[in-house]
Image (spheres, rainbow, N blue to C red):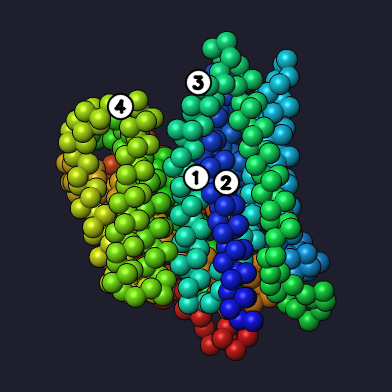
Amino acid sequence: MEENKVQNYSFSLVKLTMLFFMWGFITCLNDILIPYLKGVFDLSQFEATLVQLAFFFAYFVVSLIYFIVSATFGDPILKIGYKNTISLGLFISAVACFLFFIEADSETPVFAVFLLALFLLGAGFTFLQIAANPLVAMLGTPETASSRLNLSQAFNSLGTTLAPIIGGVLIFDYFLVDGQGASSVRIPYLVLASLLLILFGVIFFAEIPNVNVVDDQKGLDKLGALRHPHLRYGMIGIFCYVGAEVAIGSNLVEYMKNIHSMTELNASKLLTFYWGGAMIGRFMGSISMSKMAMHLKCLCMVLSAVASLVLIFCVIGLSADMTLKQFFTFFFDMKVYYFLFFLVLNFFVFIMAKSLPSRTLGMFAVMNMLLITLMLVMNNEVSLWAILAVGLFNSIMFPNLVTLAIDGLGKYTSQGSSLLVMMILGGAVVPPLQGLLSDSINAHVAFVLPLACYAYLVWYGYVGCKRRKADAED
């Protein structure tokens, strides 16, 4: 009986991993929509960035509403279950993609309707974040929860790595009509809507356990999740992590142009290593925190790193339409081999962390502080690749933070998850603050802000994530 239960969990996790890939892929298409819609509607740069605002603001609004409803009337997920919440999120996201298709087919498309579609898409993804992350953590033993979440998040990163090249080809090349026009997003978003509906059917009819579902919530503390200090500290941790990751990614091109006199084209290519590093680290993290034998674990980590690195090289080469000779020239001119050194360092830090989520989080945050400090005190190629290598050590932070923050919440897990998703707001707050520092001082010194964010994560990994005695008794 127990063996069948584990087998069912395995099939459930495969389906949920497909979900993580899809929402990572679609999320990254927003980066392509910004320059595309800017050209279609003749927008200013500020108006074009409303694309990201409409999408990410939905995370904060919907998760805040969810928490208010949970605190006032009882937790909705405890009533309808995790699987049904995920299905609802997929359906809303599919409707949003169909709205893209309908509006793009209009003779006079309206930019505000695209923003509404993006808000709906973000709302659907909020339900996925609230339900899918804790569900993946709960479908199996607590000891390997971080391993499962890292694997799912790795496929999310795989989606974000592939989306720019696939989406760019479809929207800017294959389906582009008459040089410009909203119609070229019709077919891509129709396909995405169809895939989301198929995934909705797969999840809805799948035998995914509805853990923690209760019909009667009497006696439950409506603000029960907030009674746990490790969750409250984890909320700040999510804010700091997302804020630091997005702030660095948003300011890297400007930093490379101003400090290293790099062209925007080459800077954009190197940015792939920052975001792709998160994918490499998550695949390695999933293996590192599994229950494999050490020798097999090391072998699989090396193989996953090599495969992921090859994929990143292919994405860079294909997106820039580079020949093999041009790629090798780029590899040596840009001193990409420095990244390999930091990748090896990442591997050894994983080994030293001994598969413990809290220790891994703390050590990776320390490494990011050292890498940013190295970038601040030097102005050569080593400092450039040091800041790009931060992506490698960002990798396990989100899944490990979620795992540590919801540990022991029991019936309050989904409520706690909504609070964590709400704190993704850090991605909308920290980058502008770093931008202000960059304008008032310079792009180099402005990186002290994410340095402070990682300092908090060091504390959380070693101290703040520990469950208090009252938590354990509860």
Circle on res. 159 = 1
Q: Residues within 10 Å of mark 1 (few under 14, many from 20)?
A: many
Q: Amino acid at mark 2?
A: Met
Q: Earlier in the sequence, mark 4 or mark 1?
A: 1
Q: Is residue 153 above or below residue 357?
A: above
Q: Is residue 86 above or below residue 56?
A: below
Q: Is residue 171 above or below residue 256?
A: above
Calculate the distance from the C-alpha at mark 3 to the C-alpha at mark 1: 20 Å
**Residue 374 image point, x, y percent:** 21, 52
Residue drawn at point x = 39 percent, y = 65 percent: 287
Query: Dot 2: what SS?
Result: helix
Q: Residues within 10 Å of mark 3 (few under 14, many from 20)?
A: few
Calculate the distance from the C-alpha at mark 4 to the C-alpha at mark 1: 22 Å
- The residue where tag 2 is placed is 22
Quarter of the image for residue 209 reads: bottom right
The quadrant the N terminus occupies is bottom right
Res 447 visible: no
Camera-side residue of 461 and 451:
461
Q: Earlier in the sequence, mark 3 or mark 1?
A: 1
